[in-house]
Amino acid sequence: MARTTVDIDEELIGEAMTISEASTKKGVIEEALREFVRAHRIESLRRRLGNFELGLTHEELRRMRQDE
């Protein structure tokens, strides 16, 4: 674990804490970093996979989502 000192906009971190389930600044920063990494990995995967045709109609996709 690394200890780092950074200046963070108090209004921004306060807003993040309001919408987050984290109760500490450390918690909200770690949550934000996890989300950043997750979003980057998803985008990277999308770029590697490209586009492909699923062969499903809108109605079939809707039914599949309801069945979950």
Image (cartoon, helix red, strand yellow):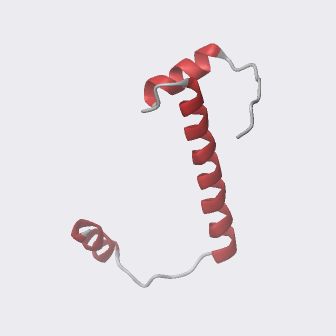
Q: Quadrant of residue 9?
A: top right
Q: Residue at x 44, y 29 (%)?
A: 19
Left or right: residue 67 versus residue 25 is left
Q: Quadrant of residue 50?
A: bottom right
Instruction: State the quadrant of the N terminus.
Output: top right
Which of the two residues, 67 or 33, is positioned nearer the viewer here?
Answer: 33
Q: Quadrant of residue 21?
A: top left
Expressed as whole percent of the image width and height from the top left, the position of residue 28 reads: 55, 31
Left or right: residue 14 versus residue 46 is left
Compared with 45, 21 (above or below) is above
Expressed as whole percent of the image width and height from the top left, the position of residue 3 reads: 74, 31
Q: Residue at x 33, y 73 (%)?
A: 61
Expressed as whole percent of the image width and height from the top left, the position of residue 35 reads: 57, 46
Expressed as whole percent of the image width and height from the top left, the position of residue 55 reads: 42, 85
Which of the two residues, 39 or 4, is positioned nearer the viewer here?
Answer: 4
Which of the two residues, 67 or 19, is positioned nearer the viewer here?
Answer: 19
